[in-house]
Image (cartoon, rainbow, N blue to C red):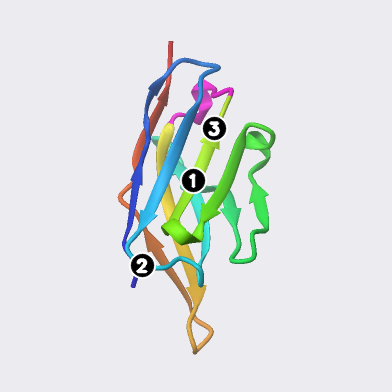
Amino acid sequence: QVQLVESGGGLVQPGGSLRLSCAASKSISIYDMGWHRQAPGKQRELVAGITRGGGTNYEDSVKGRFTISRDNAKNTVYLQMINLKPEDTAVYYCNANRRDVMNIRRDYWGQGTQVTVSS
C-alpha cells in the first residue's frame, strides 16, 4: 500500500493560482497518478492524470489552466493551477493506481485538500 498526503489548498481569488502537492509514503514509479475533485453535491471527477510513463490527460474544463507533473525521486505529484475560477472550488484528492498480479485495479487515495475560489 501507499499513503498519500495532499497539501497546498486554500482560498484564492478568481484568476489566481495554486500548486497542490501529493506526497507519497513510498516510491510512486509503479503507479499511475491522478488528481480528482469533488464539489458539494457533485460526484468526484478526474481532473488530471499522469501515467507511469509521463503521459497526461485533462478534463476539458481545465485544459490550458492546470498542469500535472510528477517527481518520482521525491515521490511527489503536483497540480499547478492557474486562472482559477469559482467553479474550480472543490476538495481535491490525490490518487495512485495500478493493476496487481491478478490484473485487479488497486486505488489509493489521500485525505483531500480544500480549494476555494472566491472574491
The reply to whether residue 43 is visible in this rendering is no
Residue 78 has which mark? 1
Residue for point 66% across, 53% down: 56
Which structural element holds mark 2? loop
Q: Is tag 2's residue or tag 3's residue first in the polypeptide sequence?
A: 2
Q: Could you tell whether 117 is left or right of 103 in the image?
A: left
Q: Is residue 85 magenta?
A: yes
Which structural element holds mark 1? strand
Residue for point 34% across, 54% down: 110
The amino acid beneath tag 2 is Lys
Which structural element holds mark 3? strand
Above or below — where is 95 with respect to 61? below
Q: Give coordinates of residue 41: x percent, y percent.
A: 41, 37
Residue for point 68% across, 40% down: 60
* Magenta-colored span: 83-89
Above or below — where is 59 with respect to 103? above
Query: What number of labels is visible?
Result: 3
Name the residue carrying label 2: 26
The amino acid beneath tag 3 is Met
Inter-mark Cα distance, 3 to 1 = 10 Å
Name the residue carrying label 3: 81
Q: Give coordinates of residue 28: x percent, y percent.
A: 46, 65
Q: Give coordinates of residue 90: x percent, y percent.
A: 42, 34
Q: Could you tell whether 97 is left or right of 4 in the image?
A: right
Q: Which is in the foreground here, disc 2 or disc 3? A: 2
Count residues near mark 1 (Cα–Cα under 10 Å), then give few for <14, some for 14-19, many for 20+. many
Count residues near mark 2 (Cα–Cα under 10 Å), then give few for <14, some for 14-19, many for 20+. some
Residue for point 65% across, 35% down: 61
